Image (cartoon, rainbow, N blue to C red):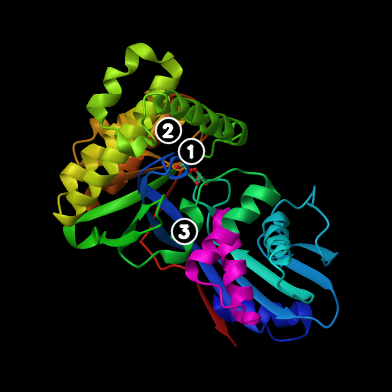
Amino acid sequence: MEKKLIADFKKRFKVKPKVVASAPGRINIIGEHTDYNNGFVLPAAIDRRINFLASSRADDKVVIRAENFEEEDSFNLPVSGKSETKKWSNYIRGVLWVLKTRGEKISGLNILIYGEVPLEAGLSSSAALEVSCITGLNSLYHMGFSPEEIAKIGQKAENDFVGVKCGLMDQFISVFGQKDSAVFLDCLTLEYKIIPFELKSRGLRIIIYNTRVKRKLAGSEYNKRRSEANSALDELKKNGIQSFRDISVVEIEKRKKNMEEKLFKRAKHVVSENYRVKKAVEALNNNDFIQLGKLLFFSHKSLRDDYQVSCPELNLLYECGRRFPTCLGARMTGAGFGGSGIAIVREETKNSFKDLVLKEADKKGFVKPEFYDVEIGEGARAVQT
Ligand code: GLA
């Protein structure tokens, strides 16, 4: 792949790329809508990446070729605003904009991007693009960013330029992911631990189920959940609780009668999800995949009923998972309102599980979903050529 992309780059720009970088998409095993609530998450990088090739130019022009779409965008530095027609370009524009606000000196660039992360599938293709771009430019211009800074620059590009108020999880895992491992991240302190997550030798498989539902609501409802969670926390603060992580599942139940129902539900999800993430880490450390699977099912229920970010297509995966004897666990992954789900199934039964889901989706008249058998891959990397 890399060789072909280098050849494509040379053909288009008549020069060699100076840097070849890439960064992965992700699944989140558990810990949903907890990152921006100063909680815990347990994502893993997948072996599908976005590739970023670049060389610098003598002028101020940036030319980006998106191989997937056979499209190009070009503009002059400094970045003056978003592209209305080429949405993919905004993640790179956003990164260049953040770098400028940080006072980094960047010349014009020739860029080629090619992605293998399914787009608009809730698998963080946008974080992968941002992180591959920053990793590449960090190497090209010797900017000396630490891995943590790379993740934060990506998040800032997304928050302040693209306009999605996401947490740090997606960019963090795209930088820090490791093969056959999940990353247990404390989103308050940014301390993290690498947790072995190896399914193959246990005869298990992780399947991604892409609902292919267009996530129209994702942006607006995501921001709404953030503000509802903030309001819920404000309520708790009146009683001296500073963070969702400081309260137990039992204690939050006791607050039910004093809180507006919706806010109580939002708080209950975050508090219980934090607990489940810690339990999931424990389960993985004990090689207890049965327990991990149960936690996945509980997480889905909580996202469906309390945080209310699921949709019928995602619920279908959960319901099929419940019915299928060798499915250990299943749930939505990422922001919700469409996008993807994950299921852990026994390897030899994975095709019958997919058949079941396909059949049920068809019965309900859903868009035909897609499945991806993925491996857990590496975080971002860059090499100078
Ligand atoms: C999106 C965001 C993340 C996180 C998840 C929900 O993927 O980008 O920061 O909030 O949703 O867990």
Q: Quadrant of the N terminus?
A: bottom right
**Rendered position, 270 above or below 21:** above
Residue appearing at x 23%, y 35% in the figure: 324
Mark 3 residue crowding within 10 angstroms, few (<14) / some (14–19) / many (20+): many
Pointers 2 and 3 in contact (C-beta within 8 Å):
no
Q: Earlier in the sequence, mark 2 or mark 3?
A: 3
Q: Is residue 310 visible?
A: no
Query: Label 1 amino acid?
Result: Thr
Q: Nearer the viewer, residue 228 or 29?
A: 228
Q: Nearer the viewer, mark 1 or mark 3?
A: 3
Badge 1 is on which residue?
211
Q: Position of residue 55 (x, y in %)?
A: 71, 81
Badge 3 is on which residue?
172
Spatial CA distance of label 1 from label 3 is 25 Å
Kindly state the secondary structure of the residue where label 2 is placed: helix
Q: Quadrant of the C terminus?
A: bottom right
Q: Is mark 1 within 8 Å of ligand 1?
A: no
Residue appearing at x 39%, y 27% in the figure: 267
Query: Label 3 amino acid?
Result: Phe
Highlighted range, magenta: 125-153
- 123 relative position to 353: left or right: right
Q: Earlier in the sequence, mark 1 or mark 2?
A: 1
